[in-house]
Image (spheres, rainbow, N blue to C red):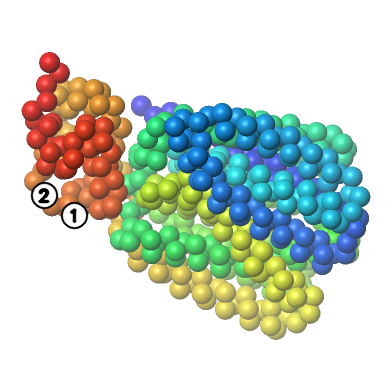
């Protein structure tokens, strides 16, 4: 029976959100001492861009330290990451010069990118053993991370104490962020229990389309974020910390509504939220009540973070490199923020409401097309793995135990031995793509020292414990 809550992974993701958002907030405030408001916005987007490189580096790091079980390299990286991260936080806190803040920020967020990719992959792997929908875990973790930051900024209210909290959070995050996937030798397939929730006609096309959707949405949300950052940096409006509470609540609500009927309506809901964000752009730029636009923005932003994180974790189950795709949502979002940074700041600074409104509407139209294109790639969604076993098959159970097959590999083997259909029919029965089925068969071949599907079936029928 599956457990209900993967608490360790939720806490680790929450810590990541806290350390990432908290350090970004501190970085912006320190930059205010040495540069103007436009420079702060650009400097913020530079560190987000550096974090993208970190997200993409993790799969390479993982491959290196997993090769020949070289765990010493991983421990060395952990120690270096913690020491370097603490130094970077200390340097940023001194706000002695633009160069020192900028360099320390870039180094720190490169580390955070690597760690962030690792913790998202760990969640993807481990949540397959739980009954909780992915969006629930993401929503809770995001809300918890934002609330920790809110407490640090309002209750602690001391720069040194906040820096110490960030350092402690970094230490815990680095220590527990790696290896929480149980270091399974076959970890790329450890999340198979979730793979059947969404299946695609073409995984590459679906992946590219998903990247385009999130990138286009990022253009809208990044423009709104830059507008808020400019107002905060100029000091013309006291935003305060209350919107952070709204952000946390929106994350919780998003996690719940996205999980309804196992995510059947996630794209429709996010489409409506994006429309709300476009309206926020109009409210802010046309001189409407700023605080109304601000509240709507924070509500939408929480939904967006939970959306792109959930979508890419779910998509990672259909790929050969899940450790890359599990954290890709944050990477695409950060990359999109960097790409649109200069243009959005230029548009906002020009105060040309007509152009800004037209750009927002065009982006919304492109998002509509991209979401439709993504939906055409879905073969089946919101469907649990199919069990075809009417009674206990004791030989199958003993065989699975003898060769350490996963639960999903067991289902594949059972269908292989009980059906003479072609690959497409077998994949349909198992609610998975053809490529995913081939991967499972290859994994079972490797474990049983067989070389083909036919050889595996023959070996199974001739196998005996004695």
* Circle 2 residue: 421
**What residue is drawn where x is 17% and y is 43%?**
452
* Circle 1 residue: 424
Residue 174 position in % (x across, y down) = 63, 34
**Where 127 sits versus 92, above or below?**
above
- Foreground residue among 100 and 166: 100
- Foreground residue among 167 and 277: 167
Residue 333 position in % (x across, y down) = 59, 58
Q: Residues within 10 Å of mark 1 (few under 14, many from 20)?
A: few
**What residue is drawn where x is 25% and y is 48%?**
438
Disc on res. 134: none
- Of the 4 image quadrants, the one containing the N terminus is top left
**What residue is drawn where x is 71% and y is 55%?**
47
Is any part of residue 413 visible from this angle?
no
Is any part of residue 236 visible from this angle?
yes
Q: Residues within 10 Å of mark 2 (few under 14, many from 20)?
A: few
**What residue is drawn where x is 53% and y is 29%?**
71
* Residue 202 horizontal side relative to residue 105, left or right: left
Quick one: which residue is furthest to the top in this view?
Answer: 466
Circle 2 sits in a helix, a strand or a loop, which is it? Answer: loop
Circle 1 sits in a helix, a strand or a loop, which is it? Answer: helix
Asked if the residue at tag 1 contacts the one at tag 2, i.e. Cβ–Cβ closer than 8 Å, the answer is yes
């Amino acid at each position: 029976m599956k457990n209900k809550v993967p608490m360790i992974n939720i806490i680790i993701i929450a810590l990541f959100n806290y350390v990432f958002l908290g350090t970004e907030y501190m970085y912006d405030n320190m930059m205010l001492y040495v540069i103007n408001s436009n420079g702060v916005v650009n400097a913020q987007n530079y560190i987000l861009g550096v974090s993208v490189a970190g997200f993409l580096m993790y799969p390479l790091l993982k491959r290196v330290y997993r090769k020949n079980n070289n765990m010493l390299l991983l421990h060395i990286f952990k120690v270096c990451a913690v020491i370097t991260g603490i130094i970077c936080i200390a340097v940023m806190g001194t706000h002695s010069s633009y160069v020192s803040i900028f360099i320390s920020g870039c180094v720190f967020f490169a580390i955070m990118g690597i760690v962030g990719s690792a913790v998202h992959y760990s969640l993807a792997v481990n949540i397959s053993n739980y009954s909780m929908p992915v969006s629930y875990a993401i929503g809770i973790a995001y809300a918890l991370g934002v609330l920790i930051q809110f407490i640090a900024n309002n209750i602690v209210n001391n720069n040194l104490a906040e820096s110490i909290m960030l350092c402690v959070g970094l230490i815990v995050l680095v220590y527990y962020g790696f290896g929480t996937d149980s270091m399974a030798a076959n970890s790329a397939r450890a999340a198979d229990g979730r793979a059947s929730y969404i299946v695609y006609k073409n995984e590459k096309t679906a992946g590219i389309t998903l990247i385009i959707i999130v990138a286009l949405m990022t253009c809208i949300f990044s423009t709104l974020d830059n507008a808020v950052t400019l107002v905060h940096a100029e000091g013309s409006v006291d935003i305060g910390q209350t919107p952070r509470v709204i952000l946390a609540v929106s994350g919780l609500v998003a996690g719940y509504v996205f999980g309804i009927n196992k995510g059947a309506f996630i794209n429709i809901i996010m489409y409506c939220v994006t429309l709300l964000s476009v309206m926020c752009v109009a409210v802010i730029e046309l001189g409407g009540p700023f605080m109304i636009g601000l509240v709507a923005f924070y509500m939408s932003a929480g939904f967006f973070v939970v959306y792109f994180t959930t979508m890419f974790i779910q998509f990672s189950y259909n790929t050969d490199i899940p450790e890359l795709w599990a954290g890709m949502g944050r990477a695409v979002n950060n990359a999109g923020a960097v790409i649109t940074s200069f243009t959005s700041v230029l548009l906002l600074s020009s105060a040309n409401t007509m152009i800004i409104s037209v750009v927002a509407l065009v982006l919304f139209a492109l998002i509509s097309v991209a979401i439709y294109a993504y939906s055409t790639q879905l073969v089946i969604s919101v469907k649990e793995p199919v069990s075809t076993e009417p009674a206990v098959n004791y030989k199958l159970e003993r065989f699975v135990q003898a060769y350490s097959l996963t639960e999903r590999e067991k289902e594949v083997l059972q269908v292989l031995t009980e059906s003479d259909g072609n690959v497409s029919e077998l994949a349909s029965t198992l609610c998975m793509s053809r490529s995913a089925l081939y991967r499972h068969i290859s994994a079972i071949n490797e474990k049983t020292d067989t070389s083909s599907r036919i050889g595996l079936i023959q070996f199974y029928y001739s196998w005996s414990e004695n």
